[in-house]
Image (cartoon, rainbow, N blue to C red):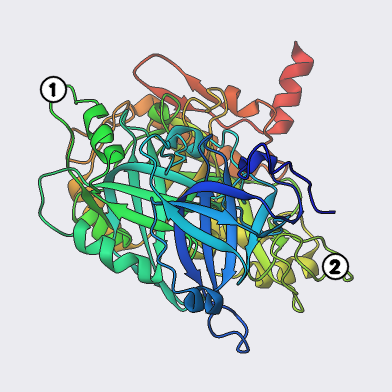
Amino acid sequence: MAASYSLTSSIYVNISELEPGRSSFGIKVRVVRCYRQPSPHKADPDGTLELILHDEIGDRIHATMDYGVFKDKKLDIIEGNLYKFMSFMVAHDMSKYRTTTNPFKLRLYNSTSITSFQDSDFPSSMYNFRDLFEIANDIAVDNFQLLDVIGRVVSYQKPTFVAKLSTNRMDFKIANTQGRELGCSLWSEYIDPVLEIFAKDDPRPIIICIQFGKITRIFDEIKVSNTFHVTKVTVNGETDVFKNFLDGMVPDAAGNQNNGIAEEFHDIYALFKNNAAQMSDISILTKVTETKNYWIDATIFSVETKGECWYRSCWKCFKKMPMDEKNRKCFICGELNFNDNFRYKIEVMVADIGGCAALMMWDTNCNTLIGKSAKHMKQLNDKAGTVIPRELKEALVDKRVLFEVKCPANKVNKDVPQFTVNRVAVDEDIFNIYAANYTPTKGSTTGSKNKVHEMDDDASSRLMKGKEKMDTDDKFEATFDGEYAENCKEVDSEETDVVYTSKKKKSKLKKDH
């Protein structure tokens, strides 16, 4: 039912006062965003004009108009300018991705009156920034609410072609004034204008603002990416928000602003060849105070699993799907899955110079290490009827790997540290470069050559005996119940001895006590 207002008191109302129905009242607003949305239907080649508006209180609402009507009106709508809207329809906003928190949107027609006006006292609320630290740590993050971010570009990767989507993607990282970082991605036509600025040899810091960016989750990592047409990307803008960001940047220890931008190497070989890999060890990973990625040189000594080492997934979004023949539609993206698609999800225990840790590996990295797809491995396992396939153990256990792991800020269990693997490297050429350029000392991080820290003979001997015991004990089985905390004991502050204890031996020790 249409809302009723007393036009004698005011012909204009606030956005918060709008209710569903056809209106004869008006609103005074500033245009935050104005863009054209193409139509997916051939019958409507013009698409729509989309507007995001805010009133003098700061409340926002989305408005839409057929682009053909917009052309007929010969309107000139400019972002940042003020307009009066009269005679429109208020309806529920059913969009999947929301540009505002308002449950309603405006439908503008040929009869809608749109006129510009001037008011120097009308406030400007063009941005609605979210804190990068909150986004990176998943604090009150809504996957379907578009948001604004601003930050200094600290690193970037050259664009890569995503064959599945037949388009290019460029990843980069931004940092807030305190140095907190967040990953971002740009797709397709959004890349070239930004990449041109990134590649310039400019000593000034590069500040980028992404308006109406979309939350993207890649397993446990959160990024901000563009969504087509509505997202607006501005680099080194002239508005006050850019000036205020520069003024708020915290200098480094030497009193200088960190203005540099580094090229990240998507190719792992190039990463190590250019001495750009940030190496560390497990003892350091447990102490990080901000989310960051590190490389470790570690050896897998056991495969852990809670159930199977794979899951049935949607072929499009890779999310887990129930093992039910009737449920063929993904509840996340709505895609129909006519064929079974399986992906790896494997937990392994690894040891390096600094201790032991549990690593979670997903499909791409598992395929690299195992050499067989999850579907193929499942078929082998269905015949054998084992919990963990023998072929999988043989492919992983005792394998030395360079792991790139994500370290969440202040969230690492110090007794049983657990991390997610981003990338792996097992190529001999990469190991040769690593051996020549990277020799990190225990308890430090480095991107350059350092003195090698080696286990003493006694510690090395115990490590080998433990591995021999694991190999000969058929009933060896480890769990996440704290056993690893006992298996990874620090003899003193300088060395870490790794002792592997089978469950059979552990139960015997309990009886003795």
Q: Which of 251/508 is in front?
A: 251
Decide: few, some or many residues near mark 2? Use Cα within 10 Å; few <14, some 14-19, many ≥20.
few
Could you tell whether 250 is left or right of 77 in the image? left
Q: Where, by quadrant of the figure, is residue 91 drawn? A: bottom right
Image position of 128 with respect to 158: above or below: above
Q: Amino acid at mark 2?
A: Asn
Q: Residue at x 81, y 62 (%)?
A: 385
Numbered-mark total: 2
Q: Residue 444's spot in the image, x, y percent?
A: 29, 28
Residue 399 visible within the image? no
Circle 1 residue: 255
Q: Amino acid at mark 1?
A: Gly
Query: How far is disc 1 from disc 2 in space, using C-alphas?
Result: 59 Å
Circle 2 residue: 327
Image position of 244 with respect to 306: above or below: above
Q: Residue 264's spot in the image, x, y percent?
A: 27, 54
Q: In what element is the residue under mark 1?
A: loop
Q: Residue furthest bottom?
A: 43
Q: Residue 479's spot in the image, x, y percent?
A: 69, 35
Q: Which of 428/110 is in front?
A: 110
